[in-house]
Amino acid sequence: MKIIAGIDIGNATTEVALAKIGNFGIEFLGSSLYKTTGLKGTEDNLEGVKKAISSLLTKVQLKLEDLDLIRINEATPVIGDVSMETITETIITESTMIGHNPDTPGGCGIGVGITIELDDLKNLSGDLLNEDYIVIANEDKNFLEIAKILNLEMERNIRIKGAILQRDDGVLVNNRLTIKIPIVDEVQLLEKIPKGVKCCVEVALKGRVIEKISNPYGIATIFELNPEETKKVVPLSKALIGNRSGVVIKTPQGDVKEKIIPAGNLYIKGNKSTEEVGIQEGAEKIMEKLSFLNVQDIFGEDGTNVGGMLKNVKNTMSTFTGESIDDIKIKDLLAVDTFVPQKIKGGLAGEFMLENAVGLAVMVGTEKNQMDHLAKVIKKDLGIDVEVGGVEADMAIKGALTTPGTGKPLAIIDIGAGSTDACSIDKSGRKAHTHLAGAGNMVTLLIQKELGIKDFNLAEDIKKYPLAKVESFFHIRYEDGSVEFFNEPLSPNIYAKIVLIKNGELIPIEVDATLEKIRNIRRESKRKVFVVNSKRALKKISLTKNIRDFEFVIIVGGSALDFEVPEMITEALSKYGVVAGCGNIRGTEGPRNAVATGLVLGDRV
């Protein structure tokens, strides 16, 4: 009777399966998981291996001396990295618009008139009394003074149709007016608004968004624009879409432009040719170029962000392995179109605009296998025999086949933090495998950038846990519409807030977005990475490049534990007649521990 540990050293986690093996078969004793220390396949992995083994042996009440053999996976070091390239920007010239979204604008409706300083109202006389006005009030005056002056001027029939305030006093002023007008507040650079020009202020009712000035034809109607001028206001109206309030000002030189930012070129080297594609052309074009080539290497244009990222991952790999940077190649890339909030250049109120961006994930590997050296390091430290048990993809297949109800032919998709792997086995035992860039970390980046979150860990939690809205001290409404009531009152700290349901706790999140928007961004990010990469991976391991070649697909890996990813992939693959589902390794482990289990089984499957 021998006690064997199979250890799968992954990019993010180190997993262990422990079993007794004798003449009468195999008895699995348990499994454990620990965060991988250092780059996969290097000496730094030793600490993580020791912690994972130690915790498992303690759990099953065994000692290190009881262990007869350790098998580790045969795999080359792989580094994944992600980057975000913004490819458009919005620039305002000559104070054309104020498109920010203050939390509490005053009043509602549309006001059109000539811009005028608050203190200049008292000087109006003669024909000027027949004009409509939009009043500008700076931070020198408080809400009481502003309301008093506006009421007095309205009493002498000055036609005040709207107001723009520097302070956050929109509601306070509106509450004190005898005649209600739309008011936009919190405009930081109020002094840059031109005086004596035509202006439109629009404020929507609570729960609604502006409709007139977010429509180019609405702007054309208000300002009597010709067809050529109407074309020019399209970026302006686009920048105002979704706001509850906004201001548009007509100036002779004013303009809002959407500018394409040169983000640099990618160069994809195949067997016979090298293809060039600009990041600003978008993800679809990049992936189209990639699909036609047997990729040998990918590099970026010098002096650009993407060029720097690609060089950085190669440098990191070179440092860890001691290989020349010229011998290290980037074998795959995933590009995803997305939107990121960016500050509008020339804005007067800190306006933000959702700009086009391309998210990139790359995978760099080396042919140099470090596992033999790592096996010697582990043996020297622990005093136990260590052997390299086989190619990772082969071991994953063996482990996946312990899922009840499976058999050959079979394909598995292993979704981790940094990469998406796939391998298949047919009835005769022939295997194929692939290793693709983009997985859990890429999804977290997309969520972080689209929601404008600075904290990566918060974006990671939003990816992993469902949402709810606290609607009273005694009930919450989940993102699926279901309601849960509580016997005890909830904490005032989470009242009326969006929360994550994390391990049974309600964790409030400070994100300036609705629950529906957060949920949509989370789910779309997962589809753009997990679903797209699952399809790519299956095509790569198919002899005919056709997903329909596979009858059964098992999803394994850390990201398969996600509460919605398996169903997304299952739904997407069902359109191809494929039966896909989450693995349950050994009938007990769920989607984890496939490679570690395969290492223990060795040649027995």
Image (tube, rainbow, N blue to C red):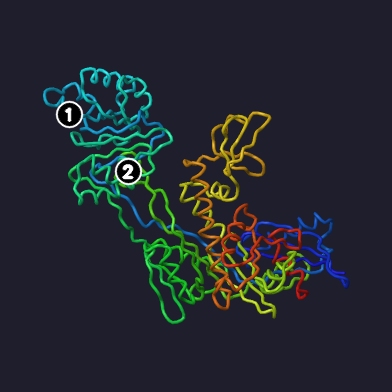
Q: Is residue 83 left or right of residue 12?
A: left
- Residue 177 pos. (x, y %): 32, 21
Residue 268 sits in quarter: bottom left
Q: In the rendered image, which residue does mark 1 sit on?
A: 131
Pick whichever, 495 or 477, lies toward us: 477
Q: Callout 1: few (<14), some (14-19), or many (20+) C-alpha neighbours within 10 Å?
A: few
| Amino acid type shown at disc 2 | Ser
- Write the residue at 33% across / 48% down: 238
- Residue 392 pos. (x, y %): 66, 71
Picture layout, residue 527 above or below residue 428: above
User: Which badge, 2 or 1, is on the more N-terminal residue?
Assistant: 1
| Mark 1 residue element | loop
Q: In the rendered image, which residue does mark 2 sit on?
A: 214
Seen as rendered, the residue at the extreme bottom is: 272
| Amino acid type shown at disc 1 | Glu
Pick whichever, 388 or 580, lies toward us: 580
